[in-house]
Image (spheres, coloured by chain):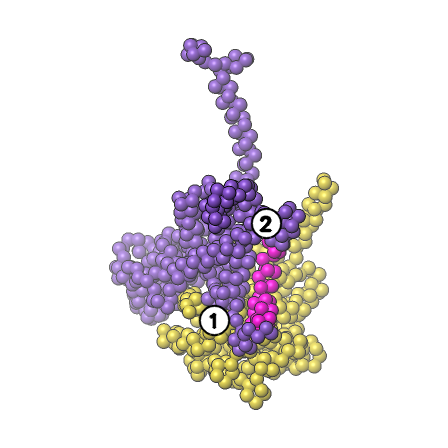
Amino acid sequence: MADLTAAAPLTTADGRPLKEALARAQRRAKTRAFLLVAPLLLFVIVSFVIPIAQMLHRSVYHDGFSANAPAVSAWFAANPPGTPPDEAAFAALAEDFRAMKAAKTAGEAGTRVNYTLPESRSLFTKTARDADRLAPPYRDAFLAVDPKWADPEVWQAMRSSSSAYTSDFYLSATDFRHTADGGIERVEPRQRIYVYLYIKTFVLSGVITLLCLILAFPVAHLLATLPMAKANLLMILVLLPFWTSLLVRTTSWMVLLQGQGVVNETLLSLGLITDSGRLRLINNQTGTIIVMTHVLLPFMILPLYSVMRVIPPSYVRAARSLGASSWTAFRRVYLPLTLPGIGAGALLVFILAVGYYITPALVGGADGQLFSNMIQFHMSKSNWSLAAALSAMLLAGVLLLYWLYDRLIGIDNLKLG
Amino acid sequence: MKKILILTTALTGWAAAASAGDLTVMSWGGAYGAAQTEAHVKPFAAKTGIPTVMVDSDNPAAPIKAMVEANNVTVDVASVEYADAIRLCDEGLLEPIDASTLPPGSDGTPATEDFLPGAITDCGVSTDIWATVYAYDTTKFPADAAPKTAADFFDLEKFPGKRGLRKGAKAVLEFALLADGVAPADVYATLSTPEGVDRAFAKLDTIKKDVVWWEAGAQPPQLLADGEVVMSTAYNGRIFNAAVAEGKPFQIVWDGQIYENEMYVVPKGAPNKDQAMEFIRFATSTDGLRAQAQNISYGPARRSALKEELIFKDGKTVMGPHLPTAPENMKNALESSWEFWVDRDAELNERFNAWLAAN
């Protein structure tokens, strides 16, 4: 047998080398498998990968100024940062303004500069209206239109807008800004918001995940251990809200929690609170936590249930019979076995919570807003680049946590059902 | 199975075809959307035979950029705030409107002279003049000690209870300054300085703990009706509708009102651009503006529309005293400055959001 393999390669019954035949058979199977996943792959690329790539691109790209003011952009490229604008710079700017007036794009260019320096937008539209009257010497002509043209901050803002690729939006998204001399500094304390909200969003999502876990664990255990008929009934109670529209659930919480709502009225009639001491359960952070915990609860219960259902009850019984107290049996035997479910549920709830925005928008009031509400805000104000930068930060945070999870617990231990 | 498939395909195909042909108007929903449906959408469809539908939005200006950039504009006419009409026009997201094609007033005055100053812009025509006012629940205060001025809104001692305010910098900062005693003429000059902005936020700080923030125009009447707040800023027409049409005990305080034009605009690349222009000509004619003002208490921006008395659709309420433009309502009124907001919107809202999030 040994010298046979050495002498000639193995062949199939019809005389072809075995290796080749195997490879061919496998290739066919692989092609078929690929063709079967191809529609999904295409769908994921078109509806997921491309939009995310576009979003990331938009967070570093804005050609509103550079495309409409090519002459002065060229001047910026030719002169190092900090160069005071000379007559040539003003002449280039005048040329751009005449073009912008003709093409009606001054608003577009001004919008881009306005992102970096407020109040530059009206400076642009105003100057464009007078563009035909700009004549040499250009510096004086510009200053006659508006003395702000002498402000080095305006020129710095234009410089940082002059290249289509920019880190400006990430600076804004982390509460930084450009200074007149080209450096960066943190914005003043009362303008700082994104870093604070970013941290708060992750902390709140952690709290919500923890609350979900605490509430879901006993329910899932009950579901997994009750006789089938009762378990099914209980399962329907879990799934019913899961199938109900998110908006319906959120608004019914508003009815329950508001100042004149069911909860407060009940407590009042029981004499537990006074009329002036009604609990503030909605339009604040408390409201966000309560409602989001409820909305996300099924995402914790279902993975936990699917894991607990297949844990044989004999394991705990065995531990008990060998002398473990019920707490030790739970801690050393049952809990470790449910870890894949806890991991899956926690990851699912946490990632969903980090990106949630409808619920905080409806019940969060002032201090219950999350990071995603800022993204939505900038989308609606058509500052898409900043919205994209904020989204990218959120994505990075979630990916980082996913990586940490993989390192600490291992993604193979995840069991979704 | 195959039959069902064909049927559903046919149905969706039919639905798509129908929606492609329909003229779509997007407005603010609630009482305002209903008024524009009654006054403009239905009569236009009846007159021209063009199927016209109304869709609602919390702010019709918000989706326009997304639609134009995605090259998938599904809205032909949108009703947007004045500053948004200017901003979107500057950004090339709206179709220009030729003012010379607008119909003359009922008395023959050319449109450009008939409309109030500023009511026609490059890309928009005014559909009405509306105001942000505040209103209170009359059952919560005795008639002789009811709030009367903007300052009273911020007086928690004399008028205890929760306040409703729109979540956003616009009209809120101005209102705070008006309440703090700044004359309407000086409001924007004050707000242009860092000290002025600080002053506005300091005023808001005095009631911050008792504010319920609203976003959609339909919320303030609801908050008042639910007893969640005792007074709230609101769009005046919504309060009028709740008070007059639905008999709610709400009273508007006109002191410190902030008014502006609401504009009909056409998003760039609207599928039915020509019909959209025809719709705007129809809706902003003297009769069109009068019809809207008979449905909701927002003032028409044409002089010819104000010549005869306007009567509410209930047949008895005279609209004149309920309009933001009525002389007795204009005593301490501020015209919202689009120039200010086009420039400072991003910056002040960022500050506002930071202020809201901080405790």
Per the image, the residue denoted by label 2 is A223
Q: Quadrant of residue B246?
A: bottom right
Q: Is A250 contained in the magenta span?
A: yes
Provide the secondary structure element on which disc 2 rests: helix
Quarter assignment of residue B249: bottom right
Give the chain ID for the purple colour. Answer: A
Q: Main secondary structure of the magenta part?
A: helix
Callout 1: chain: B
How many numbered discs?
A: 2
- Three-letter amino acid code at the position of disc 1: Lys
User: Foreground: B293 or B285?
Assistant: B293
Residue in the picture at 54% in, 32% down: A33
The residue beneath circle 1 is B170
Colour applied to chain B: yellow
Residue A214: x and y in percent read 50, 55
**Relative to A53, is B120 on the left or the right?**
right
Rendering coords of residue A134 (x, y %): 36, 65
Coordinates of residue A31 in the picture (x, y in percent)? 53, 29
Kindly check if marks 1 and 2 are in contact, taking CB atoms under 8 A apart as contact: no
Query: Closer to us: mark 1 or mark 2?
Result: 2
Helix, strand or loop status at disc 1: loop
Q: Residues within 10 Å of mark 2 (few under 14, many from 20)?
A: many
Highlighted range, magenta: A241-268
Q: Amino acid at mark 2?
A: Leu
Which corner quadrant holds the C terminus of chain A? top right
Q: Residue at x 55, y 73 (%)?
A: A272
